[in-house]
Amino acid sequence: MKFLLSILTLAGAIHGKIIYAGVNESGGEFGSQNLPGAFGIDYAFINKYFDEYADAINYITVEKGAYALLDPHNYMRYNDPSAQPFSGSVIGNTSDPTAATTEQFGEFWTELAGRFVDNPKVIFGINNEPHDMLTSLVLANNQAAIDGIRSTGAEQLILAPGNSWTGGHSWTEGSDPSSALIHQFVDPLNNTGIDIHETSISLEVTMNVLNLVCTLIDAPPPNTISSFAIVGPENLAAVTAWLQEHNLKAVLSEFGGANNDNCRQMVDELLSYLDANDVWIGWTAWAAGPFWGPFSPCCGADTGSLEPGVLNSLGEPNAFETVWTPSMKPHVIPEDLKKNGTSSLEA
Ligand SMILES: *[C@@H]1O[C@H](CO)[C@@H](O)[C@H](O)[C@H]1NC(C)=O
Ligand SMILES: *[C@@H]1O[C@H](CO)[C@@H](O)[C@H](O)[C@H]1NC(C)=O
Ligand SMILES: *[C@@H]1O[C@H](CO)[C@@H](O)[C@H](O)[C@H]1NC(C)=O
Ligand SMILES: *[C@H]1O[C@H](CO)[C@@H](O)[C@H](O)[C@H]1NC(C)=O
């Protein structure tokens, strides 16, 4: 299992609003079909520090003073990671002899948290996008992770995912919704928030409707709609109400938009919604990193990635200039951001 990270920018807060804001960086698992692979060839971390994981985290948190959210990007699965997100054994599946157990997942987090116990600017993301499993098992695995992390003495912020790709729009939907169970974790330090992604379009949305919402160019085959389009803040209303009901806070750790005016507007509206609802304490935009090159994490050839100083595949400015600068950066309010102290739900 390799790890990834999001870089979160800095500062100290008055309003209790967005205290973490940044960008998702491609991580150790990114693009890797050749496991365990060689560093710099099959995997890498941030571009600035072309070095291995702890060094990348230290660069972000110590040298730059920012907060870093790290997670195993494993969809709560293990085995056959190169074919994820759809393959691999669900962690804690007791019917599958090749599956890691919930207890082993707790041991994994005990080991990982132990390595960062003295770094107050790390945030622990339990796992990326659990899906197609029982929500009760997501909860059990989350609890094992929390217990493992706290057993080391680590006091930093933990982010717990839900089921169904931890999607915000579907949080309360379906026969086994995240909303029924995911709040039932116990953290003795009360320093666990919810990790939510809003990159999915609900399947009933047709291409035509989608075009009205946020035009997508070159949605990657075989999908006729990209699963990475931005969706409107109305899709977060139910999960926001759920967070309020359970007195929880959340970070929107994956969202994005294409290089067009509809998407720029939708990104702006989404982040304005987070600004206005104080259960939301942070966000990270998807995605940057050294291995994207001119390719686009989501939205087609004319978008590219959020990596600064890289052109898109048409040789034009990438999303760092066309999406981040106009639509995301204005929502980074330096005086609100957390600058110092152990990562937490509070400024
Ligand atoms: C707060 O963090 C900033 C940025 O990392 C650092 O320069 C400063 O020395 C810190 N202040 C305190 C009081 O720790
Ligand atoms: C658990 O493992 C069994 C046996 O391999 C499999 O049939 C089942 O689909 C797995 N459950 C999940 C949620 O993956
Ligand atoms: C955590 O929250 C519970 C319930 O509000 C409270 O009883 C407990 O004292 C809190 N623990 C800490 C360490 O703040
Ligand atoms: C951010 O996205 C990249 C690209 O998919 C991935 O490699 C990385 O694991 C993600 N990081 C986090 C913390 O989710």
Image (cartoon, grey):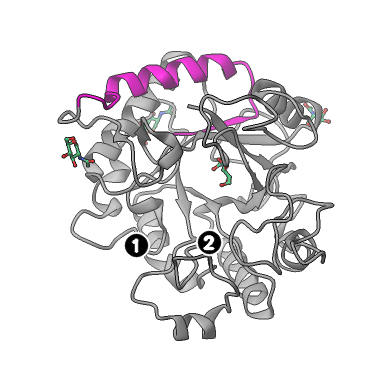
Report the residue at 71% width, 28% height from top.
56
The magenta span reads 97-126
Residue 113 percent location from the top left of the image:
51, 20
Ligand 3 lies in quarter? top left
Q: CA distance from mark 2 to mark 1?
A: 19 Å
Quadrant of the image containing the C terminus: top right
Left or right for 229, reference 323: left
Report the residue at 27% width, 23% height from top.
101
Residue 116 among magenta residues: yes
Residue corresponding to mark 2? 277
State the residue in front, 21 or 55: 55
- Helix, strand, or loop for circle 1? loop
Q: Nearer the viewer, mark 2 or mark 1?
A: 1
State the residue in front, 4 or 240: 4
Q: Tell me the amino acid under the disc marked 2.
A: Asn
Left or right for 113, reference 52: left
Q: Tell me the amino acid under the disc marked 1.
A: Ser
| Other-residue count near label 2 (Cα within 10 Å), few / some / many at <14 / 14–19 / ≥20 | some
Residue 291 visible at all: yes
Residue 346 percent location from the top left of the image:
57, 40
Q: Contact (CB < 8 A) between labels 2 and 1?
A: no
Left or right for 112, reference 63: left
Residue corresponding to mark 1? 170
